[in-house]
């Protein structure tokens, strides 16, 4: 069984083709600049050459056709023909109040997603373009949607209902949804396995730290709270997003700049977070370098110049992450493990240490030596005497999507 996993953005489309017998990747790639000029990078895993070239991609459907062409071509291919793709799994950003699990895509699902564009106007149209493109190019192959929000569906009402007039929840589905659910689900399950607590009581905090960042409180394998909200803007400060700030901020920014509320929200989404503070980059590698951090050890190199704003941006990020961990220990009623994952969580010893060094009040500490460097795969970086484990676990959202897809089409 082979599953094609699709992650469609407004002008890009990432894909991975999985052989589900071995759960191995047969090929992966990225269609970029769709509807502009178009570029395709296709990487087969069978030793055939990488295709990396400009190619006209006027629509998502043409991008999917180009992907199928490469997957089945003599020079770059990994399968004989389309019949070797058994199903397509789509990453879908927002499942609203209806989709509490992954689902086979049919006309009703598409109609509901169209209605939910009001909840995620930037993301759902792109997901729909990816789904429609696959339907047109592969009409007889089952398609599955796997939602970023589903894992958090189990939050209790008091965690997901906002303290605003209740009618907005009733009439417009305004509630906390949370995102990165596929990642939180995947890494929390691995953590629970390593704790030998599968099927038993467990209390895990997962920290998905990437361009977009969120934390989740996971009790007995189930999400009971998460930092992102009705949109991904809430919660931690991120690369370019402000995270939770005084809601009056949008009005204050609009008044200060003489701009619209929409433009002010755009500033909170695209020009804030660590970029807003450091101003030169939102990339943690750049910010750490400017702050004098040794990227390999995570230690500050005192012989180097320290950019004060870069340091402040890192401090703000790590302080808020630690503060949410404290809050989630309360939500969980204890703590068995903290998990770090995604671009920053997996690769930045500095951020992991700077967060954990703030957790002394919880009797949690990291091992500075085990934390050093970049190692692929699962890592236990718990310090001696720590009351909870600290794990680094590479996330794999595509594999979860492929697994859910297979499970649904085999039902
Ligand atoms: P997303 O999927 O949300 O776009 P990723 O999970 O790929 O983001 O994470 C991207 C972030 O990870 C960037 O801020 C990048 O700087 C950071 N990152 C990647 N490698 C490192 C590293 N070695 N040290 C510090 N930060 C890193």
Image: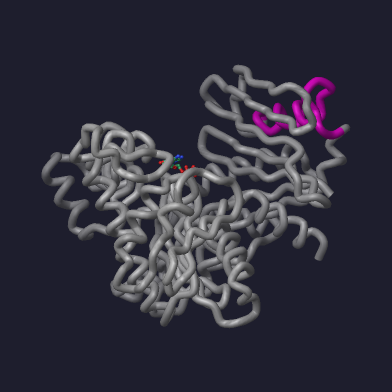
The quadrant in which residue 302 appears is: top left
* Residue occupying image coordinates x 64% and y 49%: 398
Let me know if residue 373 appears in the view. yes
- At x 51%, y 56%, the residue is 392
Q: For the C terminus, which image quadrant?
A: bottom right
Q: Is residue 338 left or right of residue 254?
A: right
How many marks the image carries: the answer is 0
Between 56 and 202, the one lying in front of the other is 202
Residue 171 is situated, as x and y percent measured from the top left of the image, at 41, 69
- Most common secondary structure along the magenta stretch: helix
At horizontal 37% and vertical 54% (from top left) the residue drawn is 353
Q: Using the image as rendered, state which of residue 333 and residue 113 is in the foreground.
A: 333
- Where does residue 105 sit, x and y in percent of width and height? 69, 55
Name the quadrant containing residue 54: top right
Give the magenta part as a residue range. Answer: 62-79
Observer-nearest of 259 and 406: 406
177 above or below 377? below
- Residue that protrudes farthest toward the top in the picture: 54
In the drawing, does residue 272 fall left or right of residue 142? Answer: left
* Residue 47 vertical position relative to residue 258 in the rendered view, above or below: above
């Amino acid at each position: 069984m082979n599953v094609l996993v699709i992650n469609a953005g407004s002008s890009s489309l990432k894909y991975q083709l999985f052989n589900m017998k071995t759960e191995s990747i047969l090929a992966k790639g990225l269609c970029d600049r769709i509807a502009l000029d178009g570029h395709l990078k296709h990487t087969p895993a069978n030793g055939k050459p990488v295709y990396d070239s400009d190619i006209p991609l006027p629509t998502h459907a043409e991008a999917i056709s180009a992907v199928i062409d490469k997957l089945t071509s003599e020079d770059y291919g990994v399968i004989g023909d389309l019949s070797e793709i058994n199903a397509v799994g789509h990453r879908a950003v927002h499942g609203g109040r209806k989709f509490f699990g992954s689902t086979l895509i049919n006309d009703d699902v598409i109609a509901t997603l169209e209605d939910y564009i009001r909840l995620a106007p930037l993301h759902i149209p792109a997901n729909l373009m990816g789904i429609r493109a696959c339907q047109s190019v592969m009409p007889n192959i089952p398609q599955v949607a796997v939602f970023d929000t589903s894992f958090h569906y189990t939050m209790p009402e008091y965690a997901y209902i906002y303290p605003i007039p209740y009618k907005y929840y009733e009439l417009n589905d305004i509630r906390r949804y949370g995102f990165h659910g596929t990642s939180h689900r995947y890494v929390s399950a691995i953590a629970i396995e390593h704790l030998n607590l599968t099927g038993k009581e467990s209390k895990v905090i997962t920290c998905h730290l990437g361009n977009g960042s969120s934390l989740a409180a996971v009790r007995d394998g189930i999400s009971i709270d998460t930092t992102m909200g009705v949109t991904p803007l809430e919660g931690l400060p991120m690369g370019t997003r402000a995270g939770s700030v005084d809601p009056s901020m949008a009005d204050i920014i609009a008044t200060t700049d003489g701009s619209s509320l929409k433009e002010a929200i755009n500033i909170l989404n695209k020009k804030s977070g660590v970029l807003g503070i450091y101003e030169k980059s939102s990339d943690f590698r750049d910010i750490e370098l400017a702050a004098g951090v040794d990227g390999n050890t995570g230690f500050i190199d005192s012989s180097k110049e320290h950019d004060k704003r870069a340091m402040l941006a890192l401090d703000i990020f790590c302080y808020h992450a630690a503060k949410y961990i404290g809050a989630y220990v309360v939500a969980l009623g204890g703590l068995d493990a903290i998990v770090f994952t995604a671009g920053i969580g997996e690769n930045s010893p500095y951020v992991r240490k700077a967060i954990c060094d703030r957790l002394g009040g919880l009797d949690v500490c990291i091992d500075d030596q085990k934390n050093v460097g970049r190692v692929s795969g699962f890592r236990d970086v718990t310090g001696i005497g720590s009351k909870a484990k600290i794990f680094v676990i590479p996330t794999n959202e595509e594999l979860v999507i492929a697994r859910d897809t297979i499970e649904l089409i085999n039902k």
